[in-house]
Image (cartoon, helix red, strand yellow):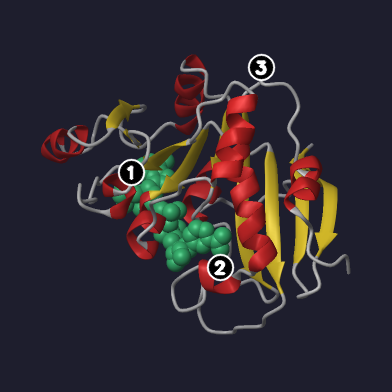
Amino acid sequence: MSGMPARDELLAAYALPDRDTPRLRMNVVASADGAVALEGRSGALGGATDRRLMQVLRAMADVILVGAGTVRAEGYGGTRVSEADAEWRVARALPPQPRLAVVSRALELEPRHPFFAEAVVRPVVVTCAAAPAGRRAVLAEVADVLVCGEETVDLAAVRATFADRGWTRTLCEGGPHLFGTLLAAGLVDEVCLTLAPRFVGGDAQRIVRGAAEADRRFALTGVLADDEGFVFLRYAAR
Ligand SMILES: NC(=O)c1ccc[n+]([C@@H]2O[C@H](COP(=O)([O-])OP(=O)(O)OC[C@H]3O[C@@H](n4cnc5c(N)ncnc54)[C@H](OP(=O)(O)O)[C@@H]3O)[C@@H](O)[C@H]2O)c1
């Protein structure tokens, strides 16, 4: 065990290479028995270092991408980075706060939801041509709406659209269906997985859903632990 990894240690351990190549990194937490949520929320599985790591990964991101299921299940929003992280970003010629983007076809999200109402930078809705036009108009009042794909959101096109805007560092915070779609499309460059020292049982899902079974091999590129028993694994796509 290594005490509680400090912010500086995490910044060094999770540093990213050059900005030129688009990179998508997943950050997920699971219980030791593989559950993605406790009482429907992933935050309930986490700990102090996990929260610190989440802040550090957000500080490094141009855009934080989440699935609409997570936004609906977790009241997800209000993801402001700390003053210190905002300063860290500005010193690296980044805007003080990363942008938030949600992936959805149904667009069953309300403008008063914290995702929009508490956003510190105008958020982004990533959708497809088949999305309901009325819902699109409603959300266009509170977010930039990007249409990528016809029947479903084409996540490779999303990556290209983000890169056109200079957003080459995408942090994806789940959930399992979005992770599964990205993985199946070969779009995940890195996975940051926190293993919580809890065995919760129940019927919670695994961290990847909806991707056909395949032997997708990643390289283990980092291992940290804290004195609460959490383990922080970093994997890179081969
Ligand atoms: N342990 C963790 O780290 C972690 C992280 C995040 C979430 N979670 C948990 O996961 C659960 C939610 O899981 P989930 O799998 O339902 O959520 P999700 O992956 O966040 O959201 C799924 C939704 O995203 C949209 N979507 C994803 N890919 C799409 C595509 N290619 N085209 C169009 N739409 C797409 C769809 O939204 P529409 O239905 O709006 O079309 C789909 O229903 C919650 O319990 C949450 O607490 C855990």
User: In whole angstroms, how far apart are the C-alphas of marks 3 and 1?
Assistant: 27 Å
Tell me which corner region of the image, top left, top right, bottom left or bottom right, holds residue 104: top left
Q: Quadrant of the N terminus?
A: bottom right
Category of crowding for the residue at label 2, using alpha-carbon neighbours closer than 10 angstroms: few (below 14), some (14–19), many (at least 20): many
Residue of label 3: 20
Dot placed on the residue nearer the N-terminal end, 1 or 2: 2
Where's residue 23, x and y in %?
A: 64, 30
Q: Amino acid at mark 3?
A: Asp
Residue of label 1: 104
Q: Secondary structure at mark 1?
A: loop
Residue at image position (54%, 49%) is 179
Say which of marks 3 and 1 sits in front. 3
- Residue 238 visible in the shown view: yes
- The answer to whether the residue bearing label 1 lies less than 8 angstroms from the nearest atom of ligand 1 is yes
77 relative position to 198: left or right: left
Dot placed on the residue nearer the N-terminal end, 2 or 3: 3
Image height of 144 relative to 39, above or below: above
Q: Quadrant of the C terminus?
A: top right
**Rendering quadrant holding ligand 1:** bottom left
- The answer to whether the residue bearing label 2 lies less than 8 angstroms from the nearest atom of ligand 1 is yes
Dot placed on the residue nearer the N-terminal end, 3 or 1: 3
Category of crowding for the residue at label 1, using alpha-carbon neighbours closer than 10 angstroms: few (below 14), some (14–19), many (at least 20): many
What is the number of the mark on residue 36?
Answer: 2
Q: Secondary structure at mark 3?
A: loop
Residue at image position (67%, 76%) is 33
